[in-house]
Image (cartoon, grey):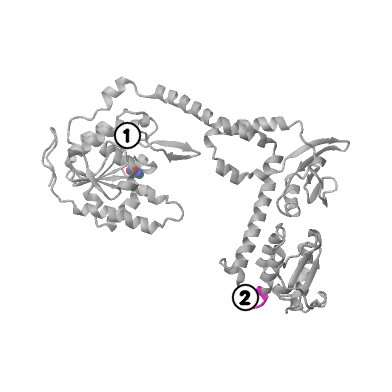
Amino acid sequence: MPASAPLHFDGSFADWKRVARAALASGVAPQQAHWRDAGAAQIELALDAPAPERIVPLADPDLAAPSPRVPRAFLDLAEDVARHRDPARWPLLYRALWRLTHGEPHLLANPADVDTHALHTLAKAVHRDIHKMRAFVRFRERATEAGPWFVAWFEPQHHIVEANAPFFRDRFASLRWSILTPGRCVHWDPDSRSLRFTPGASRADAPADDAAEDLWRTYYASIFNPARVKVDAMLAEMPRHYWKNLPEAALIPRLLAEAAPRVQRMVARSAEQSAAAAPTPGELEGRARPPATGDLAILAEAAASCHACPLWRAATCTVFGEGPREACIVLVGEQPGDHEDRVGKPFVGPAGRLLDRALAAAGIERSACYVTNAVKHFKWEPRGKRRLHATPNAREIAACRPWLEAELAAIRPGLIVCLGATAAQSVLGHALRVTEERGKKLPGPFGASALITVHPSALLRLPAGIEAEAEFQRFVADLRQIREVPDARPSEQLPGSPPAST
Ligand code: URA
């Protein structure tokens, strides 16, 4: 039967270290150690340990031979872990200390180890609570003879008040304040420039409201953006546990309930505004119809002044297709991106580079293909200084379709490669699911086949967990089908087409 060692300490990390050092010096193995935390009402930690037969006498910590050498990283991690509320942290810390000093000095370098993983999980929860306290402490002003006193009530999940006190001291150095919590309170006095800690308090000791609170609530309601509400993300950032002490939290259910109708009103307003900005019938008449020619240069020139939908207003230029008129293959993307809009050529940005790599891997020369887009203007939304891609809507795709038709009619390819759903919709005239039709050749316009595959930019933003290389190879496999296309193409020419070069 192993002997048992009841290890009494005052519940602080400093005292745990003192006792742990003595236990280590006395050879107390982790399974013998019964940590008795005076601050936690003598919780029995090793519940399933056999009944003690003999008590292990501890070495006098002051006399104990040299302190065990452990990595600095362990001490830092252990200090964080000690702030967790879980009583199992003390035996866990001791087990890790024992292993580090008994032949496993690199224990912490193995994230798959059960103890290492548990230590990091506890430390992470503590860091999160520290962060939440910084975000969610709300001071209320109390008038006193000595001047204003700012008092906050907060309910941390772990023992973090001491760790967080310097942050609040530095942030509010010139104010007199107290943060009251159930376990520990901290007070700052700018005159004596000292932090003072006192035992826990109760909610009733803190003021319930103050004059500034209405102002704060009004401000919060005014910055609440109903179009940006993501309830899951909001709950992850602002867990319900903290709500009861946040003055603005009382507003949240109402603001959430009103979010959908507010967004509908915003959308309706913006539709009215875009209708007002839409082209006049006169503009459409004069500038949106491709000339009846198979000459790609003339088509490109005409498209440069197309105003058939409002996208031309925010774009730098029309990005027309590019490549030989005698190409057997036409690659169709969605719309130019930021790079393409500046350069005036299709697929020259990050998605274009990925496409080039995939074509090369599939053994296809890009220069032998005609490359274009379903929509010829860059549609974007401002995000700070950046222009973020916005998906064209059905009306914009339809407005641009005559230009794509004119390109296809001029080239008469054997195969049209639809890169993504917008391209497929424009080429085939109806929506489809790329995930279901991918890799298939469907009947396309002008007697061509339409090969359905993904848009290369989808490979640039794969969700976590999807293997990028495998997806790239799938894309290459789709593109390899291009090689099966016979070189010949239907011979009819449109009126006005220049003779095809050979
Ligand atoms: N994405 C597209 O669909 N087309 C381009 O030209 C560039 C990016």
Assign a secondary structure to mark 2.
loop
Assign a secondary structure to mark 1.
helix
Quadrant of the image for the N terminus?
bottom right
Is 407 positioned to the left or the right of 422 in the image? Answer: left
- Of 377 and 257, the residue lying toward us: 257
Residue 115 falls in which quadrant of the image? bottom right
Q: Position of residue 202 (x, y in %)?
A: 80, 44
Which residue is label 2 attached to?
Answer: 104
**Real-space CA distance between mark 1 and mark 2, rounded to the nearest whole angstrom:** 64 Å
Which residue is label 1 attached to?
Answer: 397
- Of 143 and 481, the residue lying toward us: 481
Q: Position of residue 108 (x, y in %)?
A: 61, 68
Is 175 positioned to the left or the right of 287 in the image? Answer: right
Identify residue type, mark 2: Glu
Q: Which mark is residue 135?
A: none
Q: Is mark 2 within 8 Å of ligand 1?
A: no
Query: At x 68% / y 74%, what residue is drawn?
Result: 98
Q: Position of residue 102 (x, y in %)?
A: 66, 77
Tell me if residue 171 comes above or below residue 42 in the rendering. above
Residue 483 falls in which quadrant of the image? bottom left
Q: Which residues are magenta?
A: 99-105
Identify residue type, mark 1: Ile
Is 271 positioned to the left or the right of 348 in the image? Answer: right
